[in-house]
């Protein structure tokens, strides 16, 4: 399971991008204008069942599927927050959300299948076999095990780095602009 911050960040980003009118998002997305016709891409070979199975194994064993685990509960929490002004609904709302768990698990399986198909379209069966072998190895298992902590540490390091670089840039830009006779606040 991902640490709270990256998991919450991912869930928040996905929830914001996927939310519909019942979650406070836009009622309907505006259609994008039609893009000009692109040259036809070369036809890709059909994905075999073994290719797709390897893609699913890689997707699951890599830990990526863990990110889907927090999205549906985040939607449930959004719905609960929207109903906070009606406390009399809490018990029934909790029961409804609990009853929906099997349906929501099917929805999660849909995105897992979609993600597996994406892997299969981007990587050959031989590449997926090599990657799956890595994730089955002790090093691969350790990589997946440490991934949440690494991501959490990276998020913290990036926040510090972003602040430092932002301040550094402003100091440098002010100094250079000062050399040109401009005073920046």
Image: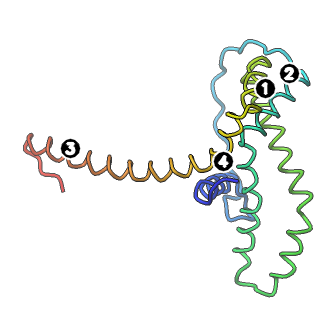
CB under 8 Å between discs 3 and 1: no
| Residue 78, above or below 92 | above
3 vs 1, front mark? 1
**Disc 4 element:** loop
Few, some or many residues within 10 Å of mark 1 (<14, 14–19, 20+):
many
CB under 8 Å between discs 1 and 2: yes
Check disc 1 and report the residue beneath it: 120
Q: Position of residue 141 (x, y in %)?
A: 71, 38
**Disc 1 element:** helix
Q: Position of residue 51 (x, y in %)?
A: 85, 23
CB under 8 Å between discs 4 and 1: no
Sequence order check, earlier mark of 3 and 4: 4
Sequence order check, earlier mark of 3 and 1: 1
* Distance Cα–Cα, label 3 vs label 2: 53 Å
CB under 8 Å between discs 3 and 4: no
* Distance Cα–Cα, label 4 vs label 1: 31 Å
Check disc 2 and report the residue beneath it: 47
Q: Quadrant of the C terminus?
A: bottom left
Sequence order check, earlier mark of 2 and 4: 4
Q: Position of residue 5 (x, y in %)?
A: 58, 58
Check disc 4 and report the residue beneath it: 30
| Residue 101, above or below 141 | below
Few, some or many residues within 10 Å of mark 3 (<14, 14–19, 20+):
few
| Residue appearing at x 59%, y 54% in the figure | 6
Few, some or many residues within 10 Å of mark 4 (<14, 14–19, 20+):
few
* Distance Cα–Cα, label 3 vs label 1: 47 Å
* Distance Cα–Cα, label 2 vs label 4: 33 Å
Sequence order check, earlier mark of 1 and 2: 2
Check disc 3 and report the residue beneath it: 173
Q: Quadrant of residue 101?
A: bottom right
């Amino acid at each position: 399971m991902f640490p709270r911050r990256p998991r919450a960040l991912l869930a928040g980003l996905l929830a914001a991008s996927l939310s519909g009118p019942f979650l406070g998002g836009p009622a309907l997305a505006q259609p994008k204008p039609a893009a000009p016709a692109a040259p036809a891409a070369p036809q890709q070979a059909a994905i075999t069942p073994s290719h797709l199975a390897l893609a699913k194994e890689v997707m699951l064993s890599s830990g990526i599927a863990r990110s889907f685990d927090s999205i549906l509960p985040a939607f449930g929490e959004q719905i609960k927050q929207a109903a906070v002004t009606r406390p009399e609904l809490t018990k029934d709302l909790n029961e409804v959300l609990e009853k929906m768990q099997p349906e929501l698990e099917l929805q999660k399986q849909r995105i897992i299948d979609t993600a597996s198909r994406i892997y299969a379209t981007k990587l050959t069966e031989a590449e997926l076999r090599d990657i799956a072998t890595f994730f089955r190895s002790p090093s691969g298992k350790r990589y997946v095990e440490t991934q949440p902590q690494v991501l959490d540490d990276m998020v913290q390091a990036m926040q510090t780095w972003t602040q430092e670089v932002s301040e550094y840039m402003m100091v440098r830009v002010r100094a250079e602009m000062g050399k040109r006779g401009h005073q920046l606040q």
